[in-house]
Amino acid sequence: MARDIIEVILPEVEASQSVATKAVTPKTVTAANGIQIKEAAKNKNNSLVIVIENTASSAATVTFTAGDAYPNSMLGDLDISVGATTTIVCQIQDLARFENRDGSINLDFASGFTGNIYAVAKRAGIAPVE
């Protein structure tokens, strides 16, 4: 399967170091392709939040697929229900369950799912100098 790829949005902290912001452009989900969140593990621990919007008039299932690294991937896939015309926030607590060796995580969507997705996290380490 050729997955559609999204990158984690890393908001930028303003001068007083009080608030981080970044404009968001959600990715439209093509259910047949699924989504790969590129470099999902390259952020501050437990800060990855995935926002999934179901625009359909019926509930749908999103599957967080087990990663290809041992041992937590042994827990397998995890199905999450998204209600009709609902937006949910998924904060990843056990990234090791879903992380692939390249640092990405994959999501599959039930046939007929329509909606949008984006991922936000807190930067780990020092921000690069531009």
Image (cartoon, rainbow, N blue to C red):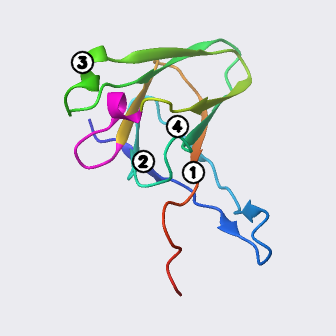
Q: Which mark is residue 40?
A: 2
Question: Which contiguous range is marked in magenta?
Answer: 95-104
Q: Is residue 58 visible?
A: yes
* Percent of width and height locating residue 60: 57, 15
| Earlier residue among tags 4 and 1 | 4
* Percent of width and height locating residue 38: 39, 51
| Earlier residue among tags 2 and 1 | 2
* Percent of width and height locating residue 112: 52, 20
Quarter of the rendering containing residue 16: bottom right
* Percent of width and height locating residue 124: 49, 60
Answer whether residue 97 is magenta in the image.
yes
In the rendered image, which residue does mark 4 sit on?
29
Q: Residue furthest bottom?
A: 130
Q: What residue type is disc 3 on?
A: Met
Mark 2–mark 1 Cα distance, whole angstroms, equals 9 Å
Q: What residue type is disc 2 on?
A: Ala
